[in-house]
Amino acid sequence: MRMVYLDTSHFDILSRVMENRPNAFLEFISAWKQNQFVLALTKVHVEEIMALSHAESRDVRFALLEHFIPFQYESENFFEREVLIELSRKGLVLPTDGEVSLRSKFFVDGVKSREQLLEIKAAHSVLRPIHVLMNKAHRVSWQAAGQAKPSKGKQPRTTDLSGRIFGKLFYWFTGLFGLNEPSWSSRGLSLSRFMQDLSFRLKVKFAIRSKLGVKVLDNTSSKTALDTLLITDCKGLWLRQEVEEKLKRANDFDVSNERDLDHVQYYPYVDLFLTDKRIINKLGQVTANHKDLVWLTELQPPLHTRDTLESLTGALFTE
């Protein structure tokens, strides 16, 4: 059994083929099952479906998913799950009795019936206005970033902040939340990297305080967790951060970037990962720059296909 992660574009292709070339579609599904493939579906996929404008289009997508049953479904927020999983592996958190248990990996929930799929659809239908709003916000954010002219000069660093009023206020703010260390100001990080570090530490603190059925051990504090857990321990979060940095440096501000990055996070946790060519290019750059990370070099290379069923079939069933 191999877990396969399809991109949004592949669901587009398969939806069209299902409606216009039913025999070819059934042949694809037959080959899928003969190869013992299992679809890895996430809440990101479902949110994208719910953001579609027409109810008919949404219904077609869910009808498509029925053909992949049984499949695995990841319903929780990615960063919370990954942070808590890594903290658990380090012995810093334990499952809380009587609450949701902390699971040791992704994609442990199985969708085994049409009824279960319809339950997912119903739950997200209620949240559809939020999904639509967030989708628009992500697109506007990347569009605005693309319109801004990136500076080609020397990038400001943390050492430039310490003697300025803004810098003092910034360090006071981060210190207020227990997120900074005295040594940070002398580390000379670029501000973009500093903000990425800060974002990661915030996510760790949030995950610890979340209601995912875990508690910090009696002899463990948030600071211990922050000092122990590294961004590279959280493979998906780190990979997302690196790819995002590559996109911005290449002045690639495609409005679909946010969702692409949401999908990239799951790459380390599936057997086959399909995405578009430019994301594959950035993943290749990240791998080339970090050959010291064994887990990264051991990942199955991501797959790219053209927008045809034949291309998708060739990539999956002859690789």
Image (spheres, rainbow, N blue to C red):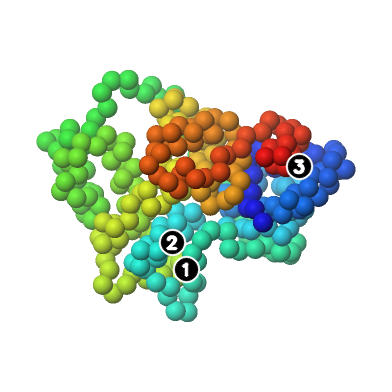
Provide the residue designation for mark 1: 102
Q: Position of residue 139 (x, y in %)?
A: 52, 35
| Three-letter code for the amino acid on which mark 1 is drawn | Leu
- Decide: few, some or many residues near mark 3? Use Cα within 10 Å; few <14, some 14-19, many ≥20: many
Q: Secondary structure at mark 3?
A: helix
Q: How many marks?
A: 3
Provide the residue designation for mark 3: 15
Q: Are marks 2 and 1 in contact (CB under 8 Å)?
A: yes
Q: Are marks 3 and 2 in contact (CB under 8 Å)?
A: no
Task: State whether residue 219 is above or below residue 69.
Answer: below
Q: Label 2, label 1: how many angstroms apart (C-alpha)? A: 7 Å
- Nearer the observer: mark 1 or 3; the answer is 1
| Three-letter code for the amino acid on which mark 2 is drawn | Ile
The residue under the point 62% across, 58% down is 73
Q: Secondary structure at mark 2?
A: helix
Specify whether 15 is left or right of 278: right
Q: Which quadrant would residue 136 be assigned to in this image? A: top right
Which quadrant is home to the N terminus?
A: bottom right
- Decide: few, some or many residues near mark 2? Use Cα within 10 Å; few <14, some 14-19, many ≥20: many
Q: Is residue 44 visible?
A: yes
The residue under the point 61% across, 40% down is 274
| Three-letter code for the amino acid on which mark 3 is drawn | Ser
The residue under the point 33% across, 52% down is 230
Q: Position of residue 179 (x, y in %)?
A: 25, 52
Task: Return the mark for residue 85.
Answer: 2
Specify whether 200 is left or right of 76: left
Looking at the image, tell me whether mark 3 or mark 2 is earlier in sequence order. 3
Looking at the image, tell me whether mark 1 or mark 3 is earlier in sequence order. 3
